[in-house]
């Protein structure tokens, strides 16, 4: 059965109190309505751990907690699926879009927005640590005006594809 991939990111967030539980997601067989994008088998756990690591990092920096937003997860999932499908890796989508365009396409009005990507790392803790050690990625995680985030995860040929979108709503 085909399911929208944003469900993967959303299904992971109830443990953080950020979204209602989504039940019945068979991650290994789930596909996006467009393009056959597969989820890692433990997508729910991985998305929860990325969100938890993000907020722990922000707390250690004296920054406010960010909350989950469905539209931002939809924008993140579009890019994760696109990267997994095309085998490309970058912030430009195969249609030429950047993260800002993908966020706007969901109907989300962002005053400020930014995106982090990772590919191939099996453990979310590796991603959070890696992003912390990279000045540009760290800057996205520490975006002081950000109030909301979205997470997208897709299973690519080289391992999981991770997308984090941070934003401040208009």
Image: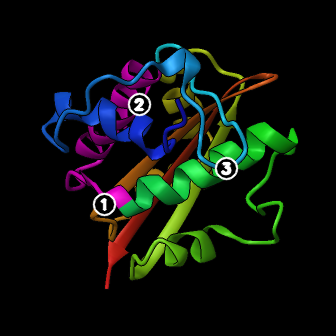
The percent coordinates of residue 74 (x first, y second) are: 47, 56
* Element type where label 3 sits in the image: loop
Find out whether residue 66 is within the magenta segment.
Answer: yes
Q: Over which residues does the magenta segment extend?
A: 43-70
The percent coordinates of residue 90 (x first, y second) are: 79, 52
- Whether residue 167 can be seen here: yes
Task: Mark 3 or mark 1: name the one nearer the start of the chain.
Answer: 3
Residue occupying image coordinates x 20% and y 56%: 64
The percent coordinates of residue 111 (x first, y second) are: 40, 84
Dot 3, crowdedness within 10 Å: few (<14), some or many (≥20)?
few
* Element type where label 1 sits in the image: strand
| Quarter residue 142 falls in | bottom left
Find out whether residue 155 is within the magenta segment.
Answer: no
Q: CA distance from mark 2 to mark 3?
A: 21 Å
Task: Mark 2 or mark 3: name the one nearer the start of the chain.
Answer: 3
Indicate whether 84 appears above or below 147.
above
- Whether residue 139 can be seen here: no
Magenta: main secondary structure equals helix
Dot 1, crowdedness within 10 Å: few (<14), some or many (≥20)?
many
Residue holding disc 1:
148
In this rendering, position of residue 59 left or right of residue 51: left
Residue at the far left in the pictured view? 17
Task: Mark 1 or mark 2: name the one nearer the start of the chain.
Answer: 2
Image quarter where the C terminus lies is bottom left
Q: Nearer the viewer, residue 141 or 113?
A: 113
Q: Which mark is residue 47?
A: 2
Frontmost of labels 3 and 1 is 3
Residue holding disc 3:
34
In this rendering, position of residue 11 left or right of residue 32: left
Q: Are marks 2 and 3 in contact (CB under 8 Å)?
A: no
Indicate whether 22 appears above or below 105.
above
In this rendering, position of residue 113 left or right of residue 119: left
């Amino acid at each position: 059965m085909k399911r929208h991939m944003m469900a993967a990111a959303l299904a992971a967030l109830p443990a953080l109190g950020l979204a209602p539980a989504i039940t019945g997601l068979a991650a290994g067989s789930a596909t996006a309505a467009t393009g056959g994008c597969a989820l890692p088998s433990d997508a729910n756990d991985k998305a929860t751990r990325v969100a938890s690591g993000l907020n722990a990092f922000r707390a250690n920096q004296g920054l406010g907690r960010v909350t989950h937003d469905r539209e931002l997860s939809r924008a993140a999932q579009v890019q994760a699926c696109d990267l997994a499908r095309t085998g490309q890796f970058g912030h430009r989508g195969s249609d030429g879009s950047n993260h800002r365009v993908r966020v706007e396409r969901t109907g989300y009005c962002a005053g400020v927005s930014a995106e982090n990507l990772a590919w191939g790392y099996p453990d979310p803790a590796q991603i959070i640590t890696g992003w912390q050690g990279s000045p540009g990625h760290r800057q996205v995680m520490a975006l002081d005006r950000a109030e909301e985030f979205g997470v997208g995860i897709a299973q690519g040929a080289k391992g999981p594809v991770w997308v984090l979108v941070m934003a401040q709503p208009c």
